[in-house]
Amino acid sequence: MNQNLDKTRYSDEELDEFRILIEEKLDKAKDQLQFYLQQLEDMADNPDAKIKGLDDGIGTAESERLTGLAARQKKHIQHLENALIRIQNKAYGICRETGKLISKERLRAVPHATLSIEAKQNR
């Protein structure tokens, strides 16, 4: 852990490791978004598929739920794409509040993190 104290940024090899991790997460996130959008499209294209005898509130609630999930997924994708830009700029993994390196453990868990645990706890 002490070897990070004098480092101001991650090495190109380390950045490449994170880039691969983020690209994998980005692919999964885009697949998930497509799934949500396809479900919404299917619901819109086939209104007769709704369960007969129940009010339309169930379809509306499901549509709102899927719309919310899709919106969250779009935001997640944007965060991951921004992280890739930070990697290109060699600014990835640097806390935007403290200027110190964010731990590798945190970045592996939340690869789009821009705050260290220390900065996040101080908020």
Image: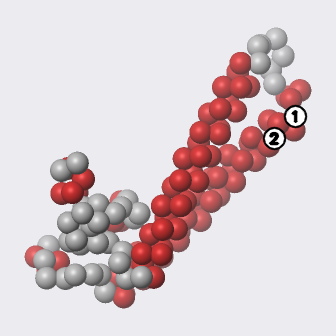
Q: Is residue 75 visible?
A: yes
Residue at image position (35%, 78%) is 91
What is the C-alpha distance between the residues marked 1 and 2? 6 Å
Q: Amino acid at mark 2?
A: Asp
**Residue lying farthest to the left in this orientation:** 2
**Residue lying farthest to the top in this orientation:** 53
Residue beneath disc 1:
46
Q: Amino acid at mark 1?
A: Asn
> Does residue 89 appear to the left or right of 26 in the view shown?
left
Crowd class of label 2 (few under 14; some 14 to 19; many from 20; radius 10 Å): few
Residue at image position (17%, 77%) is 4
Residue 7 versus residue 66 in the image, above or below = below
> Does residue 59 appear to the left or right of 3 in the view shown?
right
Find residue 35 and report its horizontal and vertical position in percent. 69, 50
Crowd class of label 1 (few under 14; some 14 to 19; many from 20; radius 10 Å): few
- Tell me the tag on residue 42: 2
Residue 36 versus residue 50 in the image, above or below = below
Name the image quarter holding the N terminus. Answer: bottom left
From the viewer's side, name the closer residue of 51 and 62: 62
- Tell me the tag on residue 96: none
Q: Is residue 103 visible?
A: no
Find residue 19 and report its horizontal and vertical position in percent. 46, 76
Residue 100 versus residue 7 in the image, above or below = above
Residue at image position (20%, 71%) is 100
> Does residue 90 appear to the left or right of 41 in the view shown?
left
Find residue 48 and report its horizontal and vertical position in percent. 89, 26
Rendering quarter of residue 65: top right
Secondary structure category for the residue under label 2: helix
Secondary structure category for the residue under label 1: loop
**Residue lying farthest to the bottom in this orientation:** 12
> Does the residue at mark 1 contact the one at mark 2 (Cβ under 8 Å)?
yes
Residue at image position (62%, 53%) is 32
